[in-house]
Structures are given as C-alpha cells and as structure tokens.
Amino acid sequence: MRKYLLPVLLICSLPASAQQLENDSLKLRQLATEVLTNSKAYEELRVLTQTVGGRLAGSPQMVKAEQWGAKTLKESGADTVYLQECKVPHWVRGAKEEVRIISRRRDFIPPLNVLALGNSVASAPGGITAPIIEIATFDELEAKKDKIKGKIVFYNHPFNPAFVRTFDSYAEAVRYRGQGASRAAKYGAVGIIIRSMTHGANNFPHTGAMAYNDSFPKIPAVAVGLQDADLLSSRLKGEPDLKLYLRTSCRMLPDTIGHNVIGEIRGTEHPEEIITVGGHLDSWDVNEGAHDDGTGCVQSIEVLRAFKALGIRPKRTIRIVLFANEENGSRGGKKYGELAKAAHEQHIFALESDAGGFTPRGFSFEMPPEKRAKIKSWAPLFLPYDIYEFDAVGGGVDVGELSAATGCPMGELFPDSQRYFDLHHAVNDVFAAVNKRELELGAFSLAALIYLVDEHGL
Amino acid sequence: MRKYLLPVLLICSLPASAQQLENDSLKLRQLATEVLTNSKAYEELRVLTQTVGGRLAGSPQMVKAEQWGAKTLKESGADTVYLQECKVPHWVRGAKEEVRIISRRRDFIPPLNVLALGNSVASAPGGITAPIIEIATFDELEAKKDKIKGKIVFYNHPFNPAFVRTFDSYAEAVRYRGQGASRAAKYGAVGIIIRSMTHGANNFPHTGAMAYNDSFPKIPAVAVGLQDADLLSSRLKGEPDLKLYLRTSCRMLPDTIGHNVIGEIRGTEHPEEIITVGGHLDSWDVNEGAHDDGTGCVQSIEVLRAFKALGIRPKRTIRIVLFANEENGSRGGKKYGELAKAAHEQHIFALESDAGGFTPRGFSFEMPPEKRAKIKSWAPLFLPYDIYEFDAVGGGVDVGELSAATGCPMGELFPDSQRYFDLHHAVNDVFAAVNKRELELGAFSLAALIYLVDEHGL
C-alpha cells in the first residue's frame, strides 16, 4: 500500500553521449505522458470490437473493419493511407456445431460445449455417430494406430500449468489442434474432438486454425471446453464403449478478396528506409477479437497519433500495417512480404503486437546479434516504465512473413501472458476484458521503440 | 504468437557456491511447479470472499473470517495456530448514503453514486443541504479559506494518469480522503465530497479510511464516482449556486475485540528466529475484499501448504499472520509489533502481500543496505519467473508496525499495479476479478523469498 520508487535510470550503462541519452529519456517520458493522458486507443478499440465485432477473413465484418482501419489511420494523421489487396480464404462455420455423448445408460447429458476448428470440413449432413478413443499425445496415437479406425479421436492433451509464460504451454499443445485431424485420419478416424488450449476455469471452447494434409481424408474437427473434456474423459473410464454424435456444417468457399490496411508517415531524411509496426485486423468469428488482435491494431495506430501530437517528424518512413487474415492463413502477412521483396523496399525493422493488450513486460526479437545488441543498449531507457525484457527470442507471425521474404529484423511486443489463454479464440475475448492503462502502456512501448529505431537507425 | 524463450539464469553473477546455487534454483522450480499445479489459494479465496464476504473490523463477518483463517491454517499444515487478541474500532456505515444535486432548474438528476468514507460521522438525521465549493488542491483550499463557511467542499483532485505505477497516483491523491474533512471543517465547511481515487472507466465510488483532527468539528465525508464527479463539476460551471443534499448515517461504536490469526511452523535449527509473512484479513464492507486483501491472506497460507507438500522443514520459525483491522486503524499490525517487542522476539524478516493478487513483478524492501544487498544477490534466481524488481523501496502497512516496534527488516510483494485502483475499496473488488495464475505466481514469489531467507538467513 506504500508508494514505490521508480528504479533509477542506469545512465552509466548506455554507450551514448549524455546529451543524446537525455534527449531520448525526455522523449520517452513525453510519449508516456501523451499516451497515458490522451490516448485514443481504448475508444478506438471499443468502436472496432463493439460496432464491427468478430471479423473473420471473407466475412462482411472484414470489409467494415477495413473501412474502419482506413478512416482511423487518416484521422490519426497518416500522410498516406492505402489498401493492399490479397486473396484470403473464405471459411464459414455454418449452423451451430453439435456434439453429444451417446450412452447406453440413457441418462441426460447436456450437449458438449464445442466450436468447430477453423478450416474444418462439415460432417455428413445428419452428423456422424462413432465410438471414441481418448489419446493424450501423438506418441500414444502411434502406439494405438490399430485401434483408431472408424472412431472419433479425443485428443485430451492437458495445457501444462507449470510453464511460467503461457505461450510455452501453447507451443506444446497447439500441434494437436493443427495436425490432429490428418494424423488421426491417416489411421481411419472419422472425426476429432480436442481439449481446448487454455488454463481457464470455465467451460468455453477455444477455436483456432487447423490444416489438412491432402494425403488423407478430411474429417471434421472440434474443440471442447475443459469441464466437458473432463466429463467426457471421466465417462469413458466407466463406459469405454461410449459413442459420440458429432455434427459440423462448416464450408470452405472459394478464396475472396481482403486487404492489408496501411498508413504511412513519410520520413524526412531517409524516406526509403521503412519501419513497420502493426497488428492483425482479422479475428475469429465467435468473439469481438479484442485481445486477438484489436489491441495490436489500435496500439499501432496510437504510435502514429502520439508522434503527431508531439510533433515528432520521423527521419525514416513509419508504416502502420493492419494485416489481413492472420488467423486462418496469414495471407496478409505473406502478401506484404511478397510485395516488399518485389519492390526492393528497404525494411530496417518490423514490430508486431499480437500477444494481447495486457500489461507489457518487454519485447522478443529475431535479428543479427549486433542489431540485437544495439536495441538492448536502449533497455535502461525503458526501466522506468517497468519494461525489462529484451532477451526473449521471437517475432510475430505477420512480420515473420516480411522477415522471411526480405531478411528484415523483427520483434514483437511481450505483454504479460497470464490471462491470454483464458480468452484466446473463445467467446470471452471481448472489449470488457481489456484494461485501458494496460493497453496504453503497450502502445507506449511500441511508440518508444519505434522512436528509438527511427532516431538512431538499426 | 510465437514461443518465448525464458531468460537464461545468470549463474555467473551470484556470489555463492555452484552447489548452493543449483540447490536454490531447483528448489524454486519445485515451488513454482507445486504452486502452479496444486495450489489451493484460488479455492480458498473463493470460500473467503464468497461465503464470508466483506469483513470490516467489528462486523459479524470479521468473526467468521477469523474462524475461516484458523481452520485453513490448520488444514494447510501449521504446527500451531492461535489468535492474538486486539481492540479494533467498530464503525458502521448505517443506512445507504444519499447525495443529490439541488438545482434551481428543477430538471431530473439521479442521486449521485457515493459511499461514506470509513470513520465518517453521520450527517444531521434528515441530511444537510448546503452550497458547494469545488477545490482541486489544499493550496486552493487555503487560498479560498474565506469562502468555505457553511459549504460542502467538493475535492475534485484528479488521479494523475501519467504515473506508471498507480500507487504513485494514489500517494498524491489520498491525502484529500484522509485529511480533507478536518482541513475543510477548520474553515467552517459542513461536509465534504471527494472524487474517488481511481482511473476506472466506470462510476463506482471508492471508500477508504479518513481521520478527524479533534481540534475541528467532525463533518460527514463521502466519495463520489468519477462520472458523477465530472457531472457535478460541469453543472457547477453553469450554475455556481447549486446546492447539495447530503445524508450519511454512519456511527462509530465503542471499540470491540478482533484477532490476528497466526499459524506457525517451528524452525528445526533456529526456532527463536522468526520470519513473518502475511496479509490482512479485514476488508471494507462494500465488496468481497478479494484483491484487498483476501489474495494476500491465501497467498501467505499457500507458502505453508507448498512447504509442507514439498517436505521443506524450515530452519527458522515461519509465521503466517492474517492481520486484523488494516483498513481503518491498523490495530492488528500494531498489536503484533507491540507483543513482539514486549516478548523480545527475534524477528529477522517480515514480508507482506497487500497490493493485490495481480501478476507479480518483484518486491519492495525497507532494510539496511547490507541486508538489501544480500536479498538482491538472489534476484537472478527469480528471473525465470519474470520477477525482476528488487530495488523498490517500501514495506507493507502491517509489517511496517512490526518494523517500527522492533526494527525488523521488511518487504512487500510488488504485483503489477495497473488494475488495482479500478477496484480498490469499491464494489467490484470481487473474486471474479482475480486471475488464478496471477494469484498463484504471487504466492510462489512469497514462498521463494521466504525459502531463501530461511535457508540463508538475513
């Protein structure tokens, strides 16, 4: 309950002139005050999430979101705003999924709380009914490959709580969502149901992308909430011949048109050097797409607004990119990288925010050691803002496509990850789950790093 | 969305034997896994907050909470559980407060959303009606001291958003809650209404303790929600002769009996050396007292449970203390300090958790430099858990009383502070606002530091 003193700025550790250090330090403080006092990010997020809502690639909401993005970038002071066309997949969920336990006991069991995985096919029109086999890992699947035929595989792989950073739990579990259907179909499975990738204390199912291997039959795939996963597992122990009724009505329509929405401030000294900062504009269809990734979009736009408000005229060209279709195809990121390469653009740094609008702790980076060392030399400037992590490795999915195409150094904002998988790809990823100050401190972190890269190059 | 790598343990910077370092590092990992996997803290918090509820000193819920505390400490494996009696103030809110804007325009204005401040007196039985004077600071109060008489002073001091750590905003604003009534009464004010101490985007009023200076008349004091504070301020601009109707029905009854609830594990090698870890069991009456400070209580109890589960037999005596009456008197902390001094107990360290059950970032400390240096030498052991702050200055209110009485070195858990003042002392400080993993990582942080102090002394 007492007042905490801010850590003292470690001036001595910076290999830069005292004057430059003082200038940078003051500029960061101005950016923080501007963002924490006058940010429009929270209100913009409200409009995006609550008037546009969920905005899966190919949906009518995707088009509304693109219009919102272009308008907001213009109002925030971009010199130039343009759309970059790309083909996007057009998957639709169709009628509400239905999954029921069929027991010989004939007791009442409510339907399981499920969501089809993104890109899943429909089941047979009237649904399918099949015995279940519970599997914890792919090793177990291989060991039981002779028992899979004609069954629905229930991947009940737990989300490991012992990792401190929850993305480590996700990295371990997400393969069952991505590859589980085709690996089961290889042995004759007729459908899969997977335990949702979450620590959440509720029963919300968490959707997300899966992909088929064309060598095997395409079978329907759904995610189930944790409480229902536990129920199913427990029922199976007493009644191994339980069956599951499963019906999905999803369809993959022909590709359609989507757009990256881009706003620029042209550099005053080195306009040919481009710095990208962005998030993805699309989201899943079952929620408001707040933390994934409305927050990344409005934080990136806030960089522009804060620069304009403080009269910062960047030396290099700053490009705010709201990427299309990260969730089920990354076609926006791929197109951005492709066009950058074709035009021989000179990209010096790309930064993404796509890990939630939670209180920031730092950044992850993928770049050569000397560039990483240069960024790390700025770390003491961030300590007064409780931003301390500069050693993590990784870039974002969308800037990863740019980096793959052009070799551009990249990074991603690293917010606190404890709450992310409570709501990731589930119905509760909504505006009300975003804290205004946490969102703003993330926006400040992006603005501060972009400022320093622009000022000192990379 | 990519996997982040954990920062590498900075082994080289620790002035200790490689063997000891490895032991400590392994023990911390065991504690983290135990707490993140098997913690009972979240379920205990549910019981405390949802079956006992708000538990102001002197209330029937206080007695239930003491019984809950003693039972839970026993079940968690304490050798000895006992109650330490103290006198506590017995303030009751009485009938719902009422505050209305009285305008000559006679338009409909809903009653303002207010809460009486803790320890406030009642207004005259039928309420009072008086003109209002809006004041931003005590300097402004002094400058306008001739215009205060017969009026209700409206302290409309904003909660500064530019501070990064919100306790800094609180430290700046809280004096208006604590001293505002008597400083206004000195110049003849008949009541005060203060802007709530919050960044919150809602209209919840935030209560909290105030104190009277006996030299001046005791006048009623209430806090008002931000939206109603803005409404009142805006109406006053157009209509300076607006009046306010204010009615409070609070009463200060004679002191009653409360208890610190204490559970101990007796040390195996130096039982005379005592290490305290605790939170406060009381809360305000208007909410469930979840983050303030149910979380501190269950985190402290979790230290005991995790030690027992891992078979850790501490060398020194570990004492879990659930303090009485932090909120409106700190009588529990004072009694604990007083008795420790009288018994010549040897307290080597006292740690508190009373800044919310949010994702932890580190600790603040108040102790001589050489002890602080010793604790700081352990900082690299905490980095894999994203615990990095060891430089902040401060102890908790309750262990502060022990420290004042005995000179005991002290510290407080430093969780992320961004969400704390959204719910501090308001109706929304409820169990549902607590994240299980954030709570558990805080409990782990306490357990890890207590383990190291016990193992290596201080």
Image (cartoon, coloured by chain):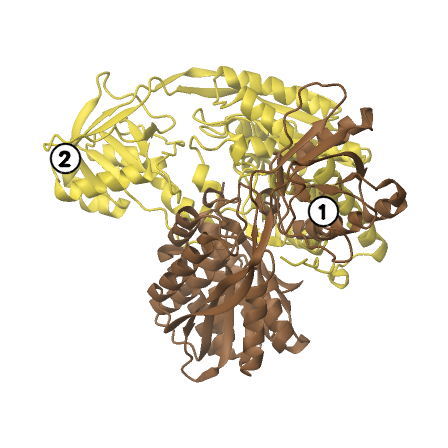
Chain colours: A yellow, B brown
Checking the image for residue A415, the label placed there is: none
Residue A393 image offset from top left, x and y in percent: 54, 50
Which residue is under mark 2?
A: A242
Callout 1, which amino acid?
A: Ile
From the viewer's perspective, is the residue at label 1 or at label 2 nearer? 1
Which residue is under mark 1?
A: B219
Callout 2, which amino acid?
A: Leu
Task: Please identify the residue farthest to the front as the structure is shown.
Answer: B125
- Reply above or below: A150 against A143: above
Q: Report helix, strand or loop for mark 2.
A: loop
Mark 1 → mark 2, Cα distance in angstroms: 71 Å
Q: Answer left or right for A117 relative to A257.
A: left
Residue A209 image offset from top left, x and y in percent: 40, 31
Label 1 is found on which chain of the structure?
Answer: B
The quarter of the image holding the N terminus of chain A is bottom right
Residue A221 image offset from top left, x and y in percent: 30, 29
> Which residue does the image show at 39% across and 60% down from the upper left?
B67
Q: Answer left or right for B74 relative to A85.
A: left
Could you tell me if residue B196 is visible in this image?
Answer: no
Q: Answer left or right for B84 relative to A303.
A: left
Which image quadrant for residue B200? top right
